[in-house]
Amino acid sequence: MLKLFRYGFAELSSISQLSRCLSIGACSRAFTSQARRDPSETDEATAAINEGERLNLESDSTRTNSNADPHQNPYKNEMEETFAPFRFVYPEFLPDPTIKWRNRVREKLERMDMLKRRSNIDIPEFYVGSILSVTLSDRNAPGKTNTFVGICIQREGTAMRSMFTLRNVVDGHGVEITFDLYNPTILNITCLRLEKRLDENLRYLRDAPPEYSTFPFDMVPELRNPDAPVPINTLKVKLNPKPWHAKWQLWDLKGVEDFSHELESREWRKLNTWKFSEGYETAKYDLMKTYRSTIPAEEQTEIYSEVHQQLAKLTASLRKQKRKRTFVKPQKTV
Amino acid sequence: MTSTLLPSVRRTFQTGRGQLLQNAGVVGPLWKLGNLQFLLNGSNTAFGGSVTFIQTREMSKVKHRHTHPRHIWAKKRRERNDQELTDDNQSFLKKIIYDTYGPTTFDWRAENTGMPFVSPLKQIIHERGVWEPRSIRTGVIARKIGIHPMWDKEGKRMLTTLLQVTDNHVLKYIPPEVVQRNYGKRFTRQDVGLLLVGAESADPQRFTKEYLNLFEESGLPPKTKISRFMVTPNAKLQPGTPLFATHFKVGQLVEIFGHTIDHGFQGVMKRWGFKGMPASHGVTKSHRRGGNTGGGGEKARIWPGTKLPGHMGNRWRKLKGQEIVRINTKYNVLYIRGPAVMGEVGSFVTVCDTFMSSVETMDKSTIPFPTHYPEESEETIPEEYYVPNLFNFGEPSIVFEEKR
Amino acid sequence: MSALKQGIASPLRLFTKTSPLMPLVIRNFHASSCLCRLQLLSRVRCVDNSAIGKQAMAEGKPPKIIHVYNKKRRATIGDKVLMTVKGEMKKGIIVGVKEHQKHGIPRSDTNNVVLIDDNGTPLGTRINAPIPMILRGIMKEKTIAKGADYTKILSIASRFV
């Protein structure tokens, strides 16, 4: 029998929490409470984010303690809870869920290659909305390096195919560069500001005023408390007037100011039809849809328990580097 | 005169027997040039020494695909009887099978190393021939397990196809004399024998007795997939010899045989890339149809080879001169340059040395002959082999240095 | 109007709204999905400071491609194109495109062009937009092959990304 259980939309955690969790051996209370959250509570949580309230660990644990019975879901075990946060920090270790392309041996070989590459280059934890700087060695300018700074607007692909896109406005011209995460010409990836946004991708920044995606190339990395959770930036972007690059009204964007005055009556009509025909409101209850589009929880556990030792070493080395610097309280962004 | 004679001649061609040709009264020599067969007749025949040619239609081109296995093949799968065995009996059967064959279940879906199970041979007798320039080695059977990108040392991205050599054993050797007797002149070379190779051991209860008889000589458990390879007698192998991915070397060119992806019955738009017809402007019921299929007059019929709807894919294809860029010896995986290997993930292909001598740059005498015996090698085999210009992920990042 | 259909970037569009030469009524929707590829009759944005280029952009009549000097007839970074600029035929080199690019090659929000003459000498003295690094390699290759010196536009570039 297939297990249909998936993790709820758990609050994301940082690398340092992971390493601490692994070093202690047993998972901390905060983690269990996060991983055990139900879908209904996820809605509450997202609502809370929308209000601009930053979630902290204590309030979470108090909220979920009441129904945190381990016997409630027999499929959940301690291992699964331990490795639950990995899927946010290292999402590219999960293979493509398309069943006809899956093969255990190939996935394992790919993971081994990725770990080899990670031992040579520090690939930091980053999310859509974080600001990164990437240094490349360029064949067109031998002997020199090429650095680009920008906000990560998209992460796509799995395993060796994983890519991320940085966006910046240089001299008033919007520029985006897509990087392969495991391309050997990458010399350095630095996370200048670690934070998350409310949306899965920020492609709408193309239709936003340039100040939302302008970052100086000489930006200094912001220092943050490594034990603190990753902050969520609840910034609401004001889009330019139409025409847009895409029909953003269909995307259910969270991080955008209300643009309903932009839409005409025929677009409203179409939007409602679309919502109905796509099963927009019922999609979240479609268990099989979720099952086909994600890797099952028990397989995630299998994968991450296999690679976690090496990953823990990498995270430890990352932490060591961070400790060398002085601690500065994270500043509020934008 | 010609019109009366020709049909009989054509009939005799279709049978493909030289004797019948003689019975029909045609004695002259025969050349074949593409689709045309030339008949050069002596002066004693009615043709008066002239050269005539007859167009024969190659039906193999028209009929692309056979839907049934050949009648000479042994029936493979056994129908399961509904008899209910008790648990004791089942475990007893399992024990018998295990005692006879050893482990028999190879699951390619699970995480496996692809290593051959223990050979039934107590000792592999290495009566191996010496390599000669025109000798042909055996090939291996592999599963396509996926595609993923790799980079070369210039930082250029390439796609590689992964083929896993799964539990391969040699089953049988058929010497050239027997091949000649059974198959006649079907092979271009007369001095070659055949080597039967099987992949992936399976539970013997699933197969028929006649299929199991194929494995009697080697003492192996039945294999899910068997295939035969043309070999010269000096490259013959003892039945029961295991085959590994190290049968090949990196940088070598290989030929890959297999079936393409089966798309089922498809229309002309998907099968042949036709444009279809407009969605509107009065078009009804023929938005995806092929349209006209031919003219009138003398050509008032569907000509052979017309592009029509039909079964798409699942055809036997071969790829020549594919380069092996990387070999994983632990998991027996060959990395082929390019995404062109036919079939979907999980399908079987056969891999053998290329016959394109003009393209092959590698010195063939350095390739292990007749195959690689890992137990004989003195040094420990490294886990990975790379071609020199492929980026190894264990190395530091690529830096382009300034030319002076 | 055709400029709007081709999907020129927003700053330009805002500019055309205020231009007296454009009609006052502007449709704020695309008649078709915007074409990211550069082909015949595509509108491009002139990013150098040549007099004719600046004037054409200021009037809201951006250059229009009428020929692409390659076999595919699709222009991408580094391709030479022939354009009409204010009624004159001018050649130019594409220095930035909207379509999706591979690893490490920048994709810009507008399709950018730099005007050159027949010898490859740029008409302007300065390029105001960031230039993709890959253009160095492409221009050097083309210079060897074609005879004209295209590397001059690299020397007037203000910034490489």
Image: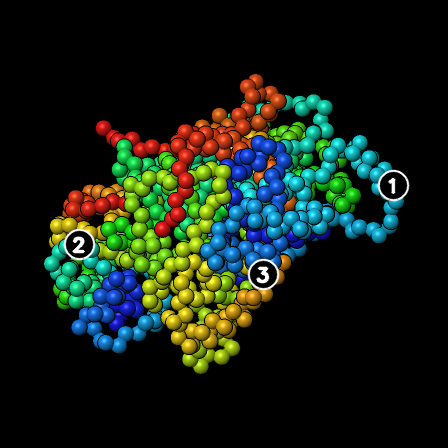
Report x, y in % for residue C26.
Answer: 28, 74
* Whether residue A301 can be seen here: no
Q: Quadrant of the C terminus of chain B?
A: top left
| Element on which disc 1 rests | helix
Asked whether the residues under the numbered discs 1 and 3 touch, taking CB atoms below 8 Å apart as contact, a structural biologist would say: no
Q: Residue A284 carries which label?
A: 3
> In the image, is B40 to the left or to the right of A298?
left
Chain to which the residue tagged by mark 1 belongs? B
Chain to which the residue tagged by mark 2 belongs? C
* Whether residue A285 can be seen here: yes
The structure residue drawn at horizontal position 54% and vertical position 48%, both measured from the top left corner, is A11
Q: Are marks 1 and 2 on the same chain?
A: no
Q: Distance of mark 1 from mark 2, alpha carbons? A: 87 Å
Vertical order, A213 against A105 (above or below): below
Report x, y in % for residue A70.
Answer: 70, 46
Report x, y in % for residue A263.
Answer: 40, 72
Vertical order, B110 against A243 (above or below): above
Residue type, label 2: Asp
Q: Which mark is residue C112?
A: none
The structure residue drawn at horizontal position 55% and vertical position 42%, both measured from the top left corner, is A86
The structure residue drawn at horizontal position 24% and vertical position 48%, both measured from the top left corner, is C131
The residue mark sitting in front, 3 or 2, is 3
Residue type, label 1: Asn
Which of the pair B165/A312 is nearer the observer?
A: A312
Residue identified by numbered label 1: B89
Q: Distance of mark 3 from mark 2, alpha carbons? A: 51 Å
Q: How crowded is mark 1: few (under 14 residues within 10 Å), some or many (20 or more)?
A: few
Report x, y in % for residue A289.
Answer: 59, 58
Asked whether the residues under the numbered discs 3 and 2 touch, taking CB atoms below 8 Å apart as contact, a structural biologist would say: no
